[in-house]
Image (cartoon, rainbow, N blue to C red):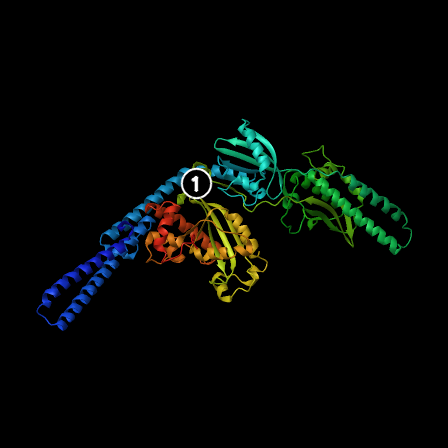
Amino acid sequence: MKRDLSLRLRVLALFGGLAVCLLLVAGLALAVVARGASSDALIQAAMIVGFGVVGAVTALWWLFDQHLARPLERLAGALRTGQAPDETARFLGDLGPAARDAARARADADRALQQAIDDHAAEQQSEKSSLEAILADFGAGAVMTDGAGRVVFYNASAAGFLPGLALDRSLAGHLQKGALDAAQMRLRAGVPATDLTCLTTQGLRLSCRLRQMPEGQLLILRDRHVDRPAPRDTLEALRRHASALVPMLDALDGPIPPALAQAIRAEGQGLARTTRTLSQIMASDAPPSTATLAEIAAGLPATELPHAVFQADAAQMNALLHMLHRQLKAEDRDASIDLQPDDEGQARVTLAWHGRPLPMDRLEAWLTASPDAAHPEMTADQILARHGTGIWAEAQDDHARLVMPLSLARQATPDSGVTYDFALATRGVASGRLADLTCVVFDTETTGLTDRDAIVQIAGLRLARGRLTGERFETLVNPGRPIPPSSTVIHGIDDVMVRNAPDLTAALTAFRHFCGDDVLVAHNAPFDMGFLRRAASQTGAHFDNRVLDTVLLSAMVWGQSEDHSLDALTDRLDITIPPQDRHTAMGDTAATAQAFLKLVQALKAKGIDTFQDVQQQAPRHRRLIADANLT
């Protein structure tokens, strides 16, 4: 039992025992004296002796606690976290300076070792960065799993195909099972690699290739071209509209009757709609490469162009536009490039000028030329056909233009890098070591501190095997009520900022998907977990994950008498929170994540190495904070 007591409690027990012994001795002495003294004198003597003994022992204990027990406890916490001891170490005589020197020597050794590692890894880091850039722009999605089917590597394209993809998660949860199971069966039969077509859980159809690796599998994902619908009906509609429009145009000898003008307008609109439909059908022939608007318009006069990425061959489209611009300029039409919105998935690239419009027969003659010197066998018409588009002339008042719709490329994920931790494959799935856990460190900002308040921001960072993976979650939340000015002063979030933010159900559903079954880590976890759990009936997002609290972990390292606020903890661990990030969900999350990683090492040095060890120690600190796993 004594082994479970802290140093300070042991000291208190020793001095308590000393007080009892002294009182017993004094009592025996008074009993001897009592034989010859009056009762009043005996009572007075007993009170003097009792209060004197208790007072002296208490004062001596307090001095011992402040000058020895407490400094020793703080010194132990500092040594375990690699920090220099604080000013209380001066009470420990030469032990304080010696510990400070040891901490500095350790810090110097750590810096020297880190520098040596950095110097040794400089060349490898350059090669690694090059490899990451290649894989990030690979075009295809790449996902590597270990023997248990857990993700240990993926690139940005894969994250775009499979939303919510994360390290140390099962790949099977993102793909419908049948095709993947059949492909894995073929690999088990001895085939080194096999092709398959599979559906994501969002219904996207992908062309895939699964390859057996030494310690897992590699899945390559590509967009599967949709089967082109037969355009017979569309072509028939074009023929019908054109057949109806020609005799109307032939009847235009005088003023246009209103009924005829309306009929021409209707047929023209039908012709435009059908042409657009045919263009969309043909868009499946677009090149697999992508090109930005800046690439397509390079070298051509243009106003400030918006950012847009097209499914197009940059060289061919740029050559085509240069040819058209030269032809227009030769006829005194000074055209410039512009971009206009079109139907979803498309945008219109235009060459616009002031002046008379271009006759269609002249444009068609230009399109018979070969604009791209690298492909002299391809005419402009063939380039347009390859891109599943066309080009036509339009006029309005004194403005004219050539219009060419192009398909927009699928939006890439903001992160263009790769995410991996190959060491995940070397540890057991059921490992309970704190350093092996896959965790989501998170924080919330709210309208207030009571259980009647609501979340206005939530952020999370994923840790795997003791390091940040780079995967993050962050969103404002519309609480459906005004945010009190007193709360805005703290976190800086007001009603205008959350007006168009997702509501609580959408935000927590997305956050639940991000967390999966990972361990949740928070500072003062009962507060944040309370908001998540109280919202379960409203949102349907149930957070029954295991929970770790950095307040509780800090108390296990430094004892309950210390200040365990986030500011105090980060100060002790030499973690800097930029002032502008304090009391923001992501800023506090980042600081908590750094603190957690340092606390894990300190707890290991103290013999608290697993999640189960933390659970066993938690009841000792229930006076400080509740266990979020039990609330």
Residue 32 vertical placement versus 235 (above, below): below
Residue 398 locus on image (x, y percent): 78, 54
Residue 324 locus on image (x, y percent): 73, 43
Residue with the most extreme top position: 190
Residue 424 visible in rendering: yes
Q: Nearer the viewer, residue 595 or 203?
A: 203
Residue 134 visible in rendering: no
Residue 276 locus on image (x, y percent): 74, 45
Q: Residues within 10 Å of mark 1 (few under 14, many from 20)?
A: few
Residue 327 locus on image (x, y percent): 75, 43
Q: Residue at x 46, y 53 (%)?
A: 589
Say which quarter of the image contains residue 63: bottom left
Report whether 623 appears left or right of 263.
left
Amino acid type, mark 1:
Ala
Q: Residue at x 52, y 34 (%)?
A: 217
Residue 260 vertical placement versus 362 (above, below): below
Q: Which residue is the site of mark 1?
A: 430
The secondary structure type at the circle numbered 1 is: loop
Q: Nearer the viewer, residue 247 or 328?
A: 247
Q: Nearer the viewer, residue 134 or 555?
A: 555
Q: Nearer the viewer, residue 246 or 428?
A: 428
Say which quarter of the image contains residue 18: bottom left
Tally of numbered discs: 1
